[in-house]
Amino acid sequence: MIGITEKLAQTQRFVDETAAHFDRNPADIRVLAVGKRHGVDRLHEAYAAGQRDFAENFVTEAIEKINALRDCEDICWHFIGRLQSNKTRIVAEHFDWVHTIDRNRIAQRLNDQRPHHAAPLNVCVQVNIDGAASKAGVAPDAALSLCQFIDDLPRLRLRGLMCMPDAKPTESEQRAVFRATAELRDHLALQRRATLDTLSMGMSADMAAAVAEGATMLRIGTAIFGVRPTESTT
Ligand SMILES: *Cc1c(COP(=O)(O)O)cnc(C)c1O
């Protein structure tokens, strides 16, 4: 069995090669290690191998890991799960990024609860770009009004869009959905007259397609940590 250090290196090599193939600068693409359901030891192993961006889905599980790794001060923590109103405070206090903003109320609460000593919270609007069965994210035609709402919140910094489409069987179908997300990002930037520098899209199974279409943050779990243990720890 190959270890996390080697899998991280393999993933980075794949991203570098894919970026080169599509005439992109690999430095513009960050790999986020998605640690959901994996123990803190495995995250620590990834940290020791040089990984600095970590992403988590479940608030309670994430806070345990953030506390356990508090000596690793240069970790950038990304929240990528569904966010309920009663969990916004703890997320506003502990994370650097939230990728899954899907309604005004969540944005408002994160803004109000972001501690004053901390930098503004980086956020992405999650779009349900392909009408995915999970229904997470705003409909594309509702994205502009949510972006404009966030633009008026001083403690949030709107960085771009996140999407998590249903699995698609072919690379060309994967690319079509990611291309639509990139085009929506361009449209929103134009409407708001302000750039959006982030496209959070692509997971283990579709990272090549995401890189091809302009992803700047890949959220990678399985390819780095292996198959997840099945029990959920929400
Ligand atoms: C679990 C998860 C990922 C990573 O998925 P893999 O297929 O294991 O790479 C990425 N994004 C979100 C939102 C997730 O929940």
Image (cartoon, rainbow, N blue to C red):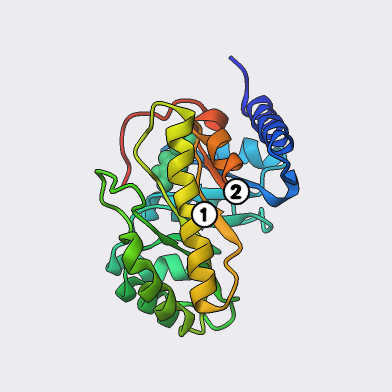
Amino acid identity at mark 2? Gly
Residue 149 location, x and y as percent? 40, 80
Total tally of numbered discs in the picture:
2
Judge whether 114 appears above or below 221 on screen. below
Q: Are marks 2 and 1 in contact (CB under 8 Å)?
A: yes
Q: Percent position (x, y) of residue 42?
A: 56, 35
Q: Which mark is residue 192?
A: none
Left or right: 71 with respect to 82?
right
Q: Name the residue: 73% across, 44% down.
A: 26
Q: Distance between the Cα atoms at labels 2 and 1? A: 7 Å
Q: Is residue 212 left or right of residue 108?
A: right
- Quarter of the image for residue 44 reads top right
Which element type, helix, strand or loop, lies under badge 1?
Answer: helix
Depth check: 177 or 205 in front?
177
Q: Which residue is mark 1?
A: 182
Q: Percent from the top left, x then y, of residue 21?
A: 71, 33
**In the rendered image, which residue does mark 2 sit on?**
214
The residue under the point 40% across, 72% down is 144
Q: Is residue 186 above or below residue 118?
A: above
Element assignment for label 2? loop
Dot 1 crowding, Cα within 10 Å, few <14, some 14–19, many 20+: many
Q: Quarter-wise, where is residue 209 in the image?
A: top right
Q: Residue pushed farthest top?
A: 1
Residue 234: x and y in percent read 31, 47
Q: Earlier in the sequence, mark 2 or mark 1?
A: 1
Q: Would residue 113 be seen by someone viewing this image from the given angle?
A: no
